[in-house]
Amino acid sequence: MRRDAQLNREKLIESARALFAERGLNVALEEVARRAGVSIGTLYNRFPTRTDLCAAVFADRAQTVVLTAEHALSMPDAWAGFTHFLEQLCLLQAADRGFNELAERGLPQPGEDQRRGYELMCELIARARREGVLREDFTTEDLALVVWSITRTIEATAAVSPQLWRRHLAMICDGLRAGAAHPLPEPPLRPEQLAGIIQGGC
């Protein structure tokens, strides 16, 4: 890629990152191009779809999730590692409206970091269940329900009580402890069901 083309790409990513964080993923792409100082045609040449732009903007977040999950797995206490990961993920969501929305929608075609993050989350859950601290019937698909519920709390309370998601997450975590478990009325989502739900993507 020519230097000027690379520079335009970087400016578009930075522009989109700032606007997504401020106003969410549905901001007009024309505004992204305008803030970057390029034409809308240049934007579409670099990123043919909004999903392509989202993937580029949030690539660093996907890497952060991987590193956070790896750190959580290195913690000797399985419950502490599991809850640390959830808290750090929610912190990322609370700090960035665009990432919060992406956590709810997902990308229809996840990249390598997203796939690695999913594998690590599976390991976190398996370890916590194996050590008897996480309820035995909790699945990786159930983790999506936790994330989705926190995204809504962050969105609804950001202007009134921006830290309220911590209270919500603490209540959820208490309910996930093995000692608090009671039989659940419905089975978990199957992996293919979850994938179908997030097919809409960015």
Image: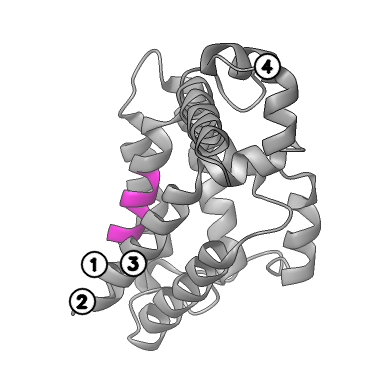
Give the SS element for disc 3. Answer: helix
Question: How far apart in space, not on screen, are marks 2 and 3 (Cα)?
Answer: 9 Å
Taking the view exactly as shown, the residue that stands out farthest to the front is 2
Count of picture labels? 4
**Magenta span:** 84-90
Residue 127 versus residue 48 in the image, above or below: below
Give the SS element for disc 2. Answer: loop
Asked if the residue at tag 1 contacts the one at tag 2, i.e. Cβ–Cβ closer than 8 Å, the answer is yes
Q: Which residue is mark 2?
A: 77
Residue 54 in which image quadrant: top right
- Whether residue 85 is in magenta: the answer is yes
Between discs 2 and 4, the one toward the N terminus: 4
Camera-side mark, 1 or 4: 4
Question: How far apart in space, not on screen, are marks 2 and 1 (Cα)?
Answer: 5 Å
Q: Which residue is mark 3?
A: 82
At horizontal 31% and vertical 50% (from top left) the residue drawn is 88
At horizontal 61% and vertical 62% (from top left) the residue drawn is 111
> Label 3: few (<14), some or many (≥20) within 10 Å?
many
Q: Which residue is mark 1?
A: 80
Between discs 1 and 4, the one toward the N terminus: 4
Asked if the residue at tag 4 contacts the one at tag 2, i.e. Cβ–Cβ closer than 8 Å, the answer is no
Mark yes or no: residue 103 visible: no
Q: Amino acid at mark 3?
A: Phe
